Amino acid sequence: MKQRVIEIKDLSIGYSVKKNTKVVAEHISSTIFSGELTCLLGANGIGKSTLLRTLTAFLPKLSGEIFIQQQEIDAYTEKELATLIGVVLTEKLDIKNMTTRELIGLGRSPYTGFWGTLSRKDKEIVDNAISLVKITHLAQRVIHTLSDGERQKVMIAKALVQETPIILLDEPTAFLDFPSKVEIMQLLHQLSRKTDKTIFLSTHDLELALQIADKIWLMDNENGIRTGTPEDMALNGSLSNFFARKGIIFDQDTGLFRIENEFDKQVRLIGHGQKYAMIRKALSRNGMMASRKANSDILIEITDAGIVISRLSLPSLIVSTIEELLEELVV
């Protein structure tokens, strides 16, 4: 059974600027569970990093309560929190002459004391984290020789060796190419399942979050924070309302985002399957609304012989690719 690991009650967050308090968000109440990957979404400057830093006690809360495993966060010492919360921040590493294994070993510092000497048990925990994150081949590499994606995996492994029930990450896919973003998000989801840890992260990678996250937190100025599974939030309109801005449409049928195009022409398109979807997408990008019921002088049929174009007062034409179709239709 999933446990309530973090409970937030009427929380207000912010920071001090020249002795004045800047309130970033207030009246936040929600729960984060064990064994789940939860993604925090919101516009730049909305307060995602401030919320994460407050949950880690890097920033003091302005008011309200944060319970970590049923105890108020202020009741913990800094050392106790280091055994409860592992943190992976956005900042790029600037470390030289240190191997991957040595850096990951630093995650054991809450347990090793002043000298940081790793016991046999500590080394086994490091080996296990390296194996879980699948970076055995990087163990002896020097940190500054790693790619951004490889370094991010190393930092996740470092958080794992802290053996904390909670891992909080601030934009873990920033600076990564798309395949690396997917790999990191899938890794975090798998780790939440395999280790039963609570993994909570902020991200701008909306579509990845909607496909991989167990829970979504939507943060904005008007509604505070709304939470739920991506599917429930799609069905109840939360995602549509959240991203209701010019040029961005949340498609409730697919659960994905699409760009709103302006149309100056209609085309009747007959067919089905992937080719139908791809032709419709290409036509839409070029200002043509395509559908099976469109009232249009242009008819496009997807057949076994190819893509048939029929127009008034012109003979029918068969093309084999979407590029050729666009060359015929786009003036």
Image: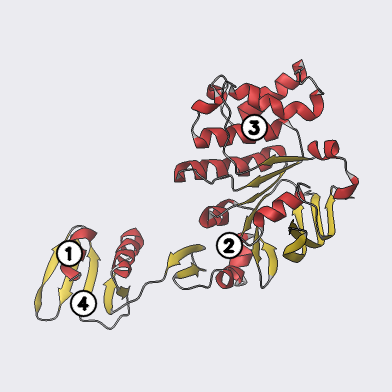
* Quarter occupied by the C terminus: bottom left
C-alpha separation, residue under disc 4 versus residue under disc 3: 57 Å
**Residue 194, above or below 311:** above
Q: Tell me which label, 4 or 1, sits earlier in the chain.
A: 4
**Residue 156, above or below 121:** below
Q: Position of residue 84 (x, y in %)?
A: 80, 40
Numbered disc 3: secondary structure: helix
Numbered disc 1: secondary structure: helix
Numbered disc 2: secondary structure: loop
Q: Position of residue 181 (x, y in %)?
A: 51, 44
Numbered disc 4: secondary structure: strand
C-alpha separation, residue under disc 3 versus residue under disc 1: 51 Å
Report the amino acid beneath label 1: Glu
Q: Position of residue 53 (x, y in %)?
A: 72, 50
- Per the image, the residue denoted by label 4 is 298
- Per the image, the residue denoted by label 2 is 43
**Residue 215, above or below 182:** below
- Per the image, the residue denoted by label 1 is 327
Report the amino acid beneath label 2: Ala
Outermost residue toward the front in this view: 18
Q: Tell me which label, 2 or 3, sits earlier in the chain.
A: 2
Report the amino acid beneath label 3: Ala
* Residue 79 in view here: yes
Q: Nearer the viewer, residue 7 or 81?
A: 81
Q: Tell me which label, 2 or 1, sits earlier in the chain.
A: 2
C-alpha separation, residue under disc 2 versus residue under disc 4: 42 Å
- Per the image, the residue denoted by label 3 is 157
